[in-house]
Every structure is written in C-alpha cells, then in structure tokens.
Image: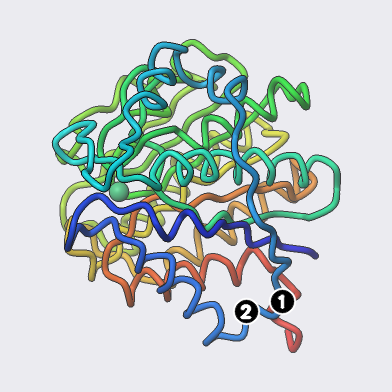
Amino acid sequence: MTTAYITHPSTEQHKISENHPECPERIWAIHDALIGSRLMDLLLPITAAPAQRAQLELAHGKDYVDFIFAAQPTADQPVQIDPDTAMNTHTLEAALHAAGAVALAVDKVMAGEINNAFCAVRPPGHHAERNRGMGFCIFNSIAVGAYQALEKHQLSRVAIVDFDVHHGNGSEDIFQDEARVLFCSSYQHPFYPYSGGANVENRRLNIPLTSGTASQQFREAYEQHCFPTLEAFKPELILISAGFDAHTADPLASLCLDEADFAWVTAQLMQIAAKNADGKIVSSLEGGYELGALGRSAAAHVKELLGAAAKPSE
Ligand SMILES: [Zn+2]
C-alpha cells in the first residue's frame, strides 16, 4: 500500500491577509501532525507540478483563467477576487500547483504507481465555480483532477465526496451537466455559501446537516445516503474534497465532528473504493481552520489512507 503526500513550497507562500484563517500555518500544522504521529515516514513525498492551461480550461472558462492570470499582483499589494478571497504575488503559483497536485495524483493512481494520495495544498478549491473564484478558492483543484481522470484516462464514472463543512458549490456548478461525475457533498445548512441544488440520481447528492450535528447523525447520514449512492454508482475513482472544518473546534462553523469521524468516513470510502475502484482514491485539502484540530484530523484521515501500512500490529 503506497500513499503519496503531495505538496509544493508555493502552498506556504500564498496569503490572503494578516490573521486570515486560510493561512500558510495550516499546511505546517498538517505537516507537524504527520511527523509527530510518525505517519510521514510511511508516506511517499511528491512535489506537485503546476496545472497547465489546458487542464484548467476543462474545469474553468477561458475568460476566467485569463482573468486570474491577469489579476496576479506584481507588487506586494494583494488583489481582491471576492470579499473573502485575495491574491498575493505567490497565489497564482500556489493555485496552479494545488490543481496540478490533484491532476498528478490522479495520473499516479491511474498508473498504479501509488494506491492513493493526500494533497496538502492551498488555496482550497471547492468554492471555485466554472467562471468565478470565491470563498478563499481560485481554481477548483478537485474538479481539475476529475477532468484529468475523465479526459486523459478516459474514466466514465468518477465520484467526488466533499465532507468540508461548507457546500461545494464550485464543484456542483462545474459538474452540473456532467453525467460521468457523481458529486456528493455534506455540509452545514443553512450556512455559507447558501447553495445546494436538488439531488439528481447518479449525478448529485447534497446532504445538508443542521448546526450542531455531531458524530452519530453525521455517520447515519453517510450510511443512509452517501454510501448507498456511491455503491450504486460504482465509481472507478473516488476523489475527496477533504475539508476538516466540520470539527467541533473549528472557529468558522458549528458542526461537532472530531478526528474519529474523519477517520471513520475515510475508512468507509476506502472500502467502497476497494470494492469498485481497485482502491483508487485521491484526496485534497479544502478547509479546516483550528490548527490543532486540523493537524489531528488530517493525520487521522491520512492514517486511514495508509491502511495496513499504518497499522502493522492489526
Ligand atoms: Zn469549508
């Protein structure tokens, strides 16, 4: 079992503003937690390559990609993309490598070089719509990865599971007319970004969760809705929008999950992937803003991705 840990130095240089919760320290927290838990030694480290324009333009409109390339500031004066999202001089490079990390992970999983991967990248991506960046997101990295699987590797059934506390409006928007992608998102509702369309069989499963939802209700929702839908879809590849801001300690939201819940949902997805997709999973970081909880949650997630490699005594 080989699990890759894919990142890039630029991911630690993109910054929205001083004291912004979507900060470089998030990557350090994950890195430190993986070292502290001795999981890092078990991972295959890979440096991300930048996404190419052609890859971006499968998920995003050409005009939007042009806009982001043109918006890149040249001096150290941030450029505001939306009220929550800004670019500094490193943002374009970081966003290109975030999307490129997921595409590279898909290539390596499809080639059988690795079993699965965790991409420790930022900016996050799942709020980025086809023609609009928002909610700390510039390019939709998980969508770029999905298109890599559909177009380069000719898959016909790719599932995206998004357990970030916020609805993945960007992924829903990008794949609204794409029959080859099942998008499944659980999220606090009503809450930012106040999106989430009606469910569509084999295409879209939205699972709204009320404020205060804790472990048991979360797990029941996945057992009743997400897992049966995934099993019926029979994905050839599972992509995970891995946001850890549904953690009870997170300052931005009000769900009450903990590390064990992220481990549980990962283990369940591993089983479904083993049965349908020869174990192929690519996970990419989305939210998670309480640094300690983020580190522990990401480590719990990665430990499950490692499977037996991280549990030699079991
Ligand atoms: Zn989030």
Q: Which mark is residue 142?
A: none
Name the side, left or right, on which 145 lies relative to 155. Answer: left
Q: Under tag 2, what secondary structure? A: loop
Question: Residue 35 placed where, x, y %?
Answer: 56, 82
Q: Under tag 1, what secondary structure? A: helix
Residue pictured at 37% horizontal, 59% vertical: 244
The quarter of the rendered structure image containing the N terminus is: bottom right
Question: Badge 1 local density, few (<14 within 10 Å), some, or many (20+)?
Answer: some
Name the one closer to the observer, 204 or 38: 38
Q: Report the label total.
A: 2
Amino acid of disc 1: Leu
- The image quadrant that residue 171 belongs to is top left
Task: Read off the residue under disc 2.
Answer: 39
Name the one closer to the observer, 258 or 16: 16
Q: Which mark is residue 42?
A: 1
Residue 78 vs 114, above or below: the answer is above
Residue pictured at 59% horizontal, 61% vertical: 267
> Do callouts 1 and 2 mark residues in contact (Cβ within 8 Å)?
yes
Amino acid of disc 2: Leu
Residue 312 vs 296, above or below: the answer is below
